[in-house]
Amino acid sequence: MNSNFMSEIAEIVGTLENRLQKLFLKLDTLEKSSTELKQELQQAAATIRQQSQEIEALKSEQSTLKIANSLLGSDENKRDTKLKINSLIREIDYCIAQLSD
């Protein structure tokens, strides 16, 4: 009976060692996967920043082109351009008045 008991303990220890080994392998795999995902996330964040900057540059360019088109006679944005010019003129008049005082 003592030999049987020792045999059972050895079997249990062997099973535990096997399970621990599998767990360590799985942990290693998960850590590698986590590292890869972090790198992908950093790359995606960098891409998003770059694309956001490009979007802002394109928006600015589009605004400039709208103004240029309206100055060249495009009826589509003439009203906006006139309002912007009037606003700039008011600001210049205000600056001149401030300098005159």
Image: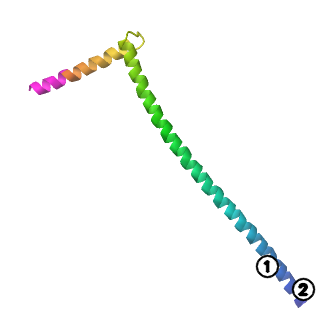
* Residue 69 position within the rendered picture, expressed as x and y whole percent measured from the top left: 40, 14
Identify whether 18 is placed above or below 50: below
Give the vertical position of 66 relative to 98 (above or below).
above
Count residues near mark 1 (Cα–Cα under 10 Å), then give few for <14, some for 14-19, many for 20+. Answer: few
Quarter holding residue 22: bottom right
Q: Which residues are magenta?
A: 93-101
Closer to us: 78 or 54: 54
Which quadrant is home to the N terminus? bottom right
Rendered image: mark on residue 63? none
Q: Which mark is residue 4?
A: 2
Q: Quadrant of residue 77?
A: top left
- Horizontal and vertical percent for residue 99? 12, 27
Q: Is residue 30 magenta?
A: no
Which residue is at 77% across, 75% downward? 17
Q: Secondary structure at mark 2?
A: helix
From this viewpoint, which residue is outermost toward the bottom? 2
Name the colouring of the figure: rainbow
Which residue is painted at 26% across and 21% down in the image? 88
The disc labelled 1 sits on which kind of residue?
Val
How packed mark 2 is, by other alpha carbons closer than 10 Å (few <14, some 14-19, many 20 or more), is few
Q: Is residue 17 above or below residue 84?
A: below
- Image quadrant containing the C terminus: top left
Task: From the viewer's perspective, tell me whether residue 45 is left or right of residue 95.
Answer: right
Q: How many marks?
A: 2
Residue at the spot of label 1: 13
Quarter location, residue 10: bottom right
| As drawn, 14 above or below 72 | below
Q: Disc 1 on helix, strand or loop?
A: helix
> What residue do we see at 44% from left, 32% from top?
56
**Separation (CA) of disc 2 from disc 1:** 14 Å
Q: Does 64 sit left or right of 98 as displayed?
A: right
